[in-house]
Amino acid sequence: MADDEKFERALKILSASRQRIETLDPVDAEEFHAERERSVEALDELAHQISGRKPLSEREQIEKKLEEAITEESFEQAAQLRLRDLSDTE
């Protein structure tokens, strides 16, 4: 299994777990609501951490460099990256 697939699988598992927790039948206890909220927050944080570690695809790398070039007002570099991005999509 490729690394990208592992990241996607992990994120799908977290999403499914979050959905299961959110759809649990409510229990008339303050602890239940607090634990459900805490669990959802923990799953969201874990998903955020995993997403942050996922390697960028080639296209995502180009888009990130393009954004940085524009922010730094390096418009010649931005134009070159944009042309590269366009040629890769053809």
Image: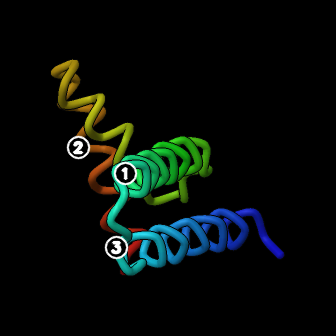
Secondary element under disc 2, as helix, strand or loop, is helix
Of residues 5 and 68, which is closer to you in this image?
Answer: 5
Q: Nearer the viewer, mark 3 or mark 1?
A: 3
Of residues 53 and 28, which is closer to you in this image?
Answer: 28
The three-letter amino acid code for the residue at tag 2 is Ala
Q: Which of marks 1 and 2 is in front?
A: 1
Of residues 35 and 16, which is closer to you in this image?
Answer: 35
* Image quadrant occupied by the C terminus: bottom left
- The spot of residue 42 in percent (x, y) is 50, 45
**Residue at numbered disc 1:** 37
Q: Residue at x 46, y 67 (%)?
A: 18
The three-letter amino acid code for the residue at tag 1 is Glu
Of residues 49 and 30, which is closer to you in this image?
Answer: 30
* Image quadrant occupied by the N terminus: bottom right
**Residue at numbered disc 3:** 26
Q: Which residue is drawn at 54% across and 59% down?
A: 57
- Distance from disc 2 to disc 3, alpha carbons, whole Å, reads 55 Å
- The spot of residue 50 in percent (x, y) is 59, 49
Quarter where residue 78 is shown: top left
Q: In this view, does 83 lie to the left or right of 11?
A: left
**Above/below status of 63 relative to 25:** above
Residue 79's disc number: 2
Name the residue furthest right.
1
Q: How crowded is mark 1: few (under 14 residues within 10 Å), some or many (20 or more)?
A: few
Secondary element under disc 1, as helix, strand or loop, is helix
**Above/below status of 57 relative to 71:** below
Q: In this view, does 37 lie to the left or right of 9?
A: left
- Distance from disc 1 to disc 2, alpha carbons, whole Å, reads 46 Å
The three-letter amino acid code for the residue at tag 3 is Pro
Figure colour scheme: rainbow
- The spot of residue 26 in percent (x, y) is 34, 73
The mark that comes first in sequence, 1 or 2, is 1
